[in-house]
Amino acid sequence: MLSKVISVYNYLLDQSGRKGAAYIVLIDPDKFSPAKAPEFLEHSIQAGVDAFLIGGSLLMSGNLEETLKIVKTHTDIPAILFPGSLNQLSPIADALLYLSLISGRNAEHLIGKQVIAAPLIRQMKIEPISTGYMLIESSVRTTAEYISGSQPIPRHKPEIAVATALAAQYLGMKFVYLEAGSGAKEHIPFEMVQAVSQVCTIPIIAGGGIRSAETAAKMAISGAKIIVTGNFFESSKNWTLLSEFADAIHFKSSKIT
Ligand code: 1GP
């Protein structure tokens, strides 16, 4: 549970430290049904989900503000923005992953958008959490790759991932996010997570294409400190599995509040 006196960043460190890894569920406003939301959020809270990420690479029809309001009405765990673009900022959010796409060489996504967003974030008083965002090749080209016009890191080149994550650490970023892309056919390789976690001291967020509790647990045991799932829980038939995922990720001790 989020106390007003600690930052969301510290809360995430605390949860992952005590539980082994923290579990974050991604909500894409395009796929969010306000009618089904209370049930979904109740399942998430009962399961012990630690926070929500809200956003997506492309916002087509979803209403970010409405999504945030519903999440904030029904839960008191952090709602963290995961902005795919500048129109995905809101003062209602508890924090924001302040992403720089460090796997790519597109200056707009490395620093351009961040410059435009910085005064807005200050005005809105949102807590920015500096995050080195690394797209990792999966078998199919993802929306994030296409929209950002950037090349992902080859999945069988852990040394490139290690060097990139280390650069993020030396630049003072707080997290590195190893991302296979939402709905990716192949999640990031466990060996890559292991390689990065053995060298880097900043926490790893792992996401994209995680569809089983076993995979989620292996990500955590490989060294990821935060595991993100999105797509899999967009289908209500899977909601009863949220507890299984949370327990697998919280491998040190489940159901701690
Ligand atoms: C995407 O890492 C997240 O940014 C979650 O991916 O939707 O494939 O679970 P999935």
Image: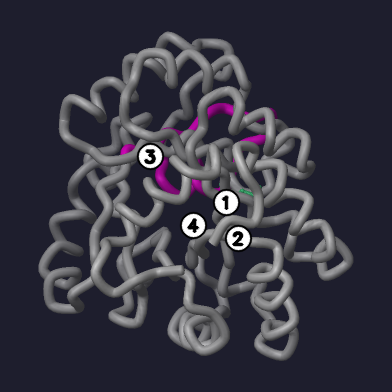
Residue shown at 14% from the left, 62% from the top? 118
- Span highlighted in magenta in the image: 132-149
Dot 2 falls on a residue whose secondary structure is loop
Image location of residue 88, percent across then percent down: 37, 71
Q: Amino acid at mark 1?
A: Tyr
Ligand 1 within 8 A of label 4's CB? yes
**Picture quarter containing residue 134?**
top left
Image location of residue 20, percent across then percent down: 54, 37
Mark with earlier residue (4, 2) = 2
Mark with earlier residue (2, 3) = 2
Residue shown at 70% from the left, 56% from the top? 231
What's the mark number on residue 133? Answer: 3
Image location of residue 226, percent across then percent down: 50, 43
In the image, taking residue 158 as reference, residue 49 lies left or right, namely right
Q: Nearer the viewer, mark 4 or mark 2?
A: 2
Residue shown at 52% from the left, 48% from the top? 22
Question: CB under 8 Å between callouts 1 and 2?
Answer: yes
Cα distance in 3D space between marks 4 and 2? 22 Å
Q: Amino acid at mark 4?
A: Ser
Residue topped by disc 1? 23
Q: Nearer the viewer, residue 31 or 222?
A: 222
